[in-house]
Image: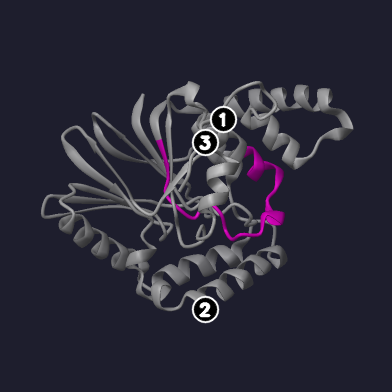
Amino acid sequence: MYNTLILSDLHLGAETSHAREATRVLKESRFQRLILLGDIFADLNFARLTKDHWKFLGYIRKLSNPKRNIEVVWVEGNHDHGLTNIMSHLVGVRVYQRYGWQYAGLRHIAIHGHQFDGFQVNNVRLSRLGTSFYLKLQKLDFKSKPIVRLIDRLNTRWLRMSPKVSAGALEYARQHQAERIFCGHTHQAVHVEEGGIHYYNSGGWVDSRLTYLTVDEQGVQIHEFNDHAFSQQEHKQRADDRDSSQERGEADSSFADFADESGLLEDVEYESVGS
């Protein structure tokens, strides 16, 4: 049982999003708190969402049911901007610009990290145009998306986002008397310690390396998704999917899957939350 599991940069709606794998991680892990650390969406176009993307959102809503006693937190990223009210009602999750908590006598802060990326802050419109072009390019790329993955890595290195974000985050933690600070945004999972303050980046779910963070009594760990370790669970999940698809028959749809997965079809009550 982890105190906290942190996952970011899933970019639902993008061709390169590994939503199915992320859902498997959540289903196979036990935690008291889940932090979705920004850029869970690629943009505001819900028409891009696939069946696996809706299933991920459905499972998030299921976790947010108060009966499960799991705290689910959404920290807004630059790609999530404008989704605060939508997410509060769609999946029953409270959305924050920054989230802080105490654990093991230490102050922890979770913030997406684009706030420390000077290019992103000063070129919002240009960044949105770049995102739109990037998503269109994904549809034209080869099956394994080698071109868009290369562009993503080159973009990170060219803008030097990783060192910029880590330096900004460490200073931010210092100003707010926090011993640990967690970010996403750069798609690179790292740990940096400076002056007794620890910076962790949760990485992303759009490249070949899929990573997430956990916090427990042993400390903070960076985990890398291992397909082999989850193969048995996937086999069982596919069997369950076949059974449910037979029941639904021709009426199956992506949003119906979301409603079924999230428990919207069940007679349960969800907590009403705001931004």
* Residue occupied by mark 3: 272
Name the residue type under label 1: Lys
Q: What residue is shown at x 23% (from left), y 37% (from top)? A: 102
In the rendered structure, find residue 126 and report the number of the disc placed on it: 2
Q: In this view, does 98 lie to the left or right of 262?
A: left
Q: In the image, which is nearer the foreground, mark 3 or mark 1?
A: 3
Q: Which residue lies furthest to the right in this view?
A: 250
The answer to whether residue 158 is visible is: no
Identify whether 49 is placed above or below 263: below
Other-residue count near label 3 (Cα within 10 Å), few / some / many at <14 / 14–19 / ≥20: few
**What sort of colour scheme is used for the picture?**
one colour
Name the residue type under label 2: Leu
Q: Is residue 130 left or right of residue 141?
A: left
State the image coordinates of residue 58 (x, y, percent, origin top left).
62, 36
Name the residue type under label 3: Ser
* Residue occupied by mark 1: 62
| Circle 1: element type | helix
Q: Which residue lies furthest to the left in this view?
A: 195
Quarter the N terminus occupies: top left
Q: Do the residues labelled 3 and 2 touch (CB within 8 Å)?
A: no
State the image coordinates of residue 107 (x, y, percent, origin top left).
20, 43
Other-residue count near label 2 (Cα within 10 Å), few / some / many at <14 / 14–19 / ≥20: few
Q: Name which of mark 1 and mark 2 comes first in the sequence.
A: 1
Identify whether 273 is placed above or below 78: above
Magenta segment boundaries in residue numbering: 34-55
- Magenta run includes residue 128: no
Q: What residue is shown at x 18% (from left), y 39% (from top)? A: 106
Q: In the image, which is nearer the foreground, mark 1 or mark 2?
A: 1
